[in-house]
Image: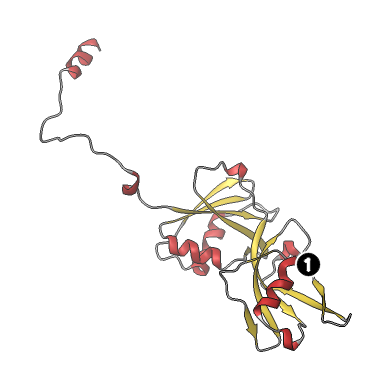
Amino acid sequence: MEDLANHCKGLSISDTEGPTFDLEEELATPEYIIAGKFYTRRALNMEAIASTFMPLWRSRNGFKVKNMGNHIVLFTFDNKHEVDSILSNEPWSFDKHLLVLQRYNKDEPIEDLKFNSTTFWVQVHDIPMRFMNPKVAEGICSTVGTVVRKSETEMNGGSFMRVRVNVDITRPLSRGRMVSVGQGREKWVSFKYERLPNICY
């Protein structure tokens, strides 16, 4: 063993082998990870999860799934735009149960992740016709959660407004709120949540 060590000390890198090659961060294969929490008591089947979301998310090169325990799964992609699209189209559900998603950068311990909010389109019904505008609808929805300003509030056929809102799922959903329409008159405005999964009932 000592003879081998002495022999290795005498070796040197030749000119053809070149200097050390630096593995810099920008040379690494890009990975974009979504951490997801499944709000169900059932055991998770990774094959069923992959087969369910593959056609829904339409990933060009597919994605990898990894079960981290406690109903948390990591979804790994090679395309940032796909991740952006998936997150911008929340909420997602699996077997009618809510799946809460967030970006994951590998530096944060899995157990420190907080899966307590997701984003819904909220329909605001019964707004008086002369107040049917985005500013009013977004103001009314301030009791629901945090309005996502980068999404465009929409009017649907003149019957209701749609507002994108990030909702705290640890609290009961707001069913609506009273609005004042002047001269001491009040009116009930109701909320309807699109693609509402089981947990939110």
Residue under the image location 66 percent in, 61 percent down: 98
Residue 157, x across and y down, in percent = 65, 89
Mark 1 neighbour density, 10 Å: few (under 14) some (14–19) many (20 or more):
some
Q: Is residue 126 visible?
A: yes
Residue 111, x across and y down, in percent = 61, 42
Residue matched to label 1: 174
Tell how many labels. 1
Extreme residue toward the top, this view: 2
Q: Nearer the viewer, residue 96 or 109?
A: 109
The C terminus, quarter of image: bottom right
Q: Is residue 70 left or right of residue 9?
A: right
Q: Judge whether 83 appears above or below 180 on screen.
A: above
Residue under the image location 88 percent in, 81 percent down: 185
Displayed quadrant of residue 15: top left
Residue 147, x across and y down, in percent = 65, 67
Extreme residue toward the left, this view: 15
Residue under the image location 43 percent in, 60 percent down: 80
Residue under the image location 15 percent in, 24 percent down: 12
Q: Judge whether 6 appears above or below 29 on screen.
A: above
Q: Secondary structure at mark 1?
A: loop
